[in-house]
Image (tube, rainbow, N blue to C red):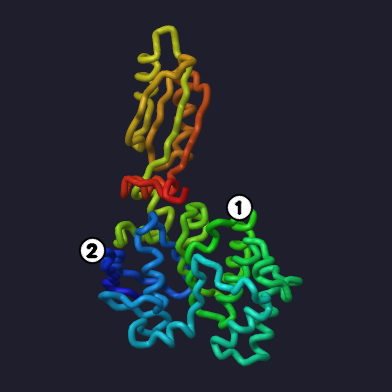
Amino acid sequence: MVEARGLTKTFTRKKELVEAVRGIDLHVDAGELVAFLGPNGAGKSTTLRMLTSLLRPTAGTATVAGFDVLTQPDEVRARIGYIGQGNAAGHSYRVLDELLNQGRFYSVPKPTAQQRAAEVIEAFELSGLEKRTVASLSGGQRRRLDVAMGLMNQPALLFLDEPTTGLDPHARANLWQHILALREQTGMTMLLTTHYLDEADSMAERIVLIDHGEVIADATPEALKRQYADDAVTLSLATSPTGAGEVAGRARALLPDSVTDVTESVTPAGAVELVLRTANGPELVPPLLGALAGSGLTVQSTDVRQASLDDVFLNLTGRSLREEAA
């Protein structure tokens, strides 16, 4: 559905050359949901704008839905939906009118457009709002309308550029419920940019990490976390009369080879705290607790924090996506 090779975009800003995208290669199969992750200015939105033919690449090639973005932009646009970061609908226009106008832009016959508008109004819970102006809608309603407008031409491929930014958690969950239900029904291909790591982790089948205009990793969420990050297991052990050092030494002797790093400290309450780095935190804990108890050590508390996509990005770039989003 998407094939890009050496996709590059440079700008001249205040007489200086800015390399926004530096030779990106990308392959997206039909039916995939692929997420772009990266900090602000990494090149995510610029890449999407090139793939949707809104921005001409400086170098490289790309085909989208089987058509060349440089030589066949009209064919590309006819087959995609694009949900940008800003609201697409005019604030003074009515909801139903905007949907029907969107159908006209794509030369959808009027009866078909009316039927399609009714379908997306129901699918995205916009019923009863048809005659309301866009300005009178809530933020979540406007965003659902944006997605509905992007679907009026029944695209084979939907681009979503930070679709839930600015929405409260309930509105975010509601919007994704509608999008995923639609995808399940149609098998639509989706290309997503987002700063919300939970969205990418739980919904995308593949994640492309971008930094400084380059792809630095491309794999499933689980594969990325296995390769570039560790789980953290925190054990709090009661101190024995022989001292914290003796307790820590006995505990360390029982750790399996899967533990790659150990940080040791003593809490203000006098307990020995060990933070273990491992690739399999949940699987490690039960047998380890049994071994510690069998050796006479008392575990006061245990905590497992599984590796996250933010850990992956922090390890690869030295920056946190959560901090970037904030």
Q: Residue at x 32, y 57 (%)?
A: 211
Between 89 and 229, the one lying in front of the other is: 89
Indicate the quadrant where residue 13 lies.
bottom left
Label 1 crowding class (10 Å Cα cut-off): few <14, some 14-19, many 20+? few
Q: Residue at x 45, y 75 (%)?
A: 30
148 is higher (above) or lower (below) than 261: below
Q: Earlier in the sequence, mark 2 or mark 1?
A: 2
Q: Which mark is residue 268?
A: none
Q: Mark 2 against mark 1, which lies toward the viewer?
A: 2
Q: Are marks 2 and 1 in contact (CB under 8 Å)?
A: no
The amino acid at mark 2 is Glu
Residue corresponding to mark 2: 16
310 is higher (above) or lower (below) than 49: above
Indicate the quadrant where residue 53 lies.
bottom left
230 is higher (above) or lower (below) than 285: below
Q: Secondary structure at mark 1?
A: helix
Residue corresponding to mark 1: 169
The amino acid at mark 1 is Pro
Give x and y (percent) for residue 214: 29, 61
* In-image side of 306 versus 111 (left or right): left
- For residue 185, say whether it is visible: no
